[in-house]
Image (tube, grey):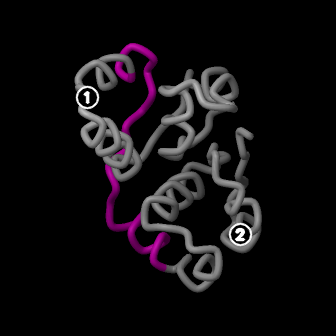
Amino acid sequence: MSVTLDASALLALLFREPGWEVVDDHLTGACISTVNLCEVLGRLARDGVATGPLLDALARTAVVLVPFDISHAEVAAAMVPHVRAHRLSLGDRACLALALARGEPALTADRAWLAVADAVGVRAQCIR
């Protein structure tokens, strides 16, 4: 089954945090929004870690990088009233919008998503 990766899921894999094995099992055929990739790259840059090796590894695993486009922006914006109380970020909504567009579950480490998934029409799977 294909999944849409949240930044938190990819970071869990990279840093071998709890749930990383779940992410590893879903890499083949997975996708990630360029917004969420930016979050991951930003975390690496903040920590002084080179980003090239991650990009090379993603290319080898065939994780699909999906540009954030106007349709994703509209869907992510429409989610605001449904997710506001749970403080989901733009990155969170970008991932959920992409998962909705692709008709696949969103893989995340953020349990708050489970409370809003039905309201926004997305299946969310928490790795922890």
Residue 93, numbered label = none
Query: Which residue is identified by label 2?
Result: 116
Q: Hey, what amino acid is under mark 1?
A: Thr
100 w.r.t. 58: above or below: below
120 w.r.t. 102: above or below: below
- Determine the secondary structure under disc 2: helix
Q: Residue at x 34, y 56 (%)?
A: 68
Q: Hey, what amino acid is under mark 2?
A: Val
* Residue 37, image x, y percentages: 36, 42
- The answer to which image quadrant residue 91 occupies is bottom left
Q: Is residue 63 magenta?
A: yes
Q: Nearer the viewer, residue 9 or 101?
A: 9
* Residue 101, image x, y percentages: 54, 56
Tell me which label, 1 or 2, sits earlier in the chain. 1
Residue 51, numbered label = 1
Magenta span: predominant SS is: helix
Q: Is residue 64 magenta?
A: yes
Q: Nearer the viewer, residue 90 or 105?
A: 90
- Determine the secondary structure under disc 1: loop
* Residue 13, image x, y percentages: 54, 27
- The answer to which image quadrant residue 5 occupies is top right
45 w.r.t. 114: above or below: above
Q: Residue furthest bottom?
A: 81
27 w.r.t. 101: above or below: above
Quadrant position of the N terminus in the picture = top right
Task: Decide if residue 94 is on the left or right side of residue 29.
Answer: left
Q: Which residues are magenta?
A: 58-77
Q: Nearer the viewer, residue 112 or 74?
A: 112
Q: Residue furthest front?
A: 47
Task: Decide if residue 3 is on the left or right side of residue 73.
Answer: right
- Asked if marks 1 and 2 touch (Cβ < 8 Å), the reply is no
Q: Residue furthest top?
A: 60
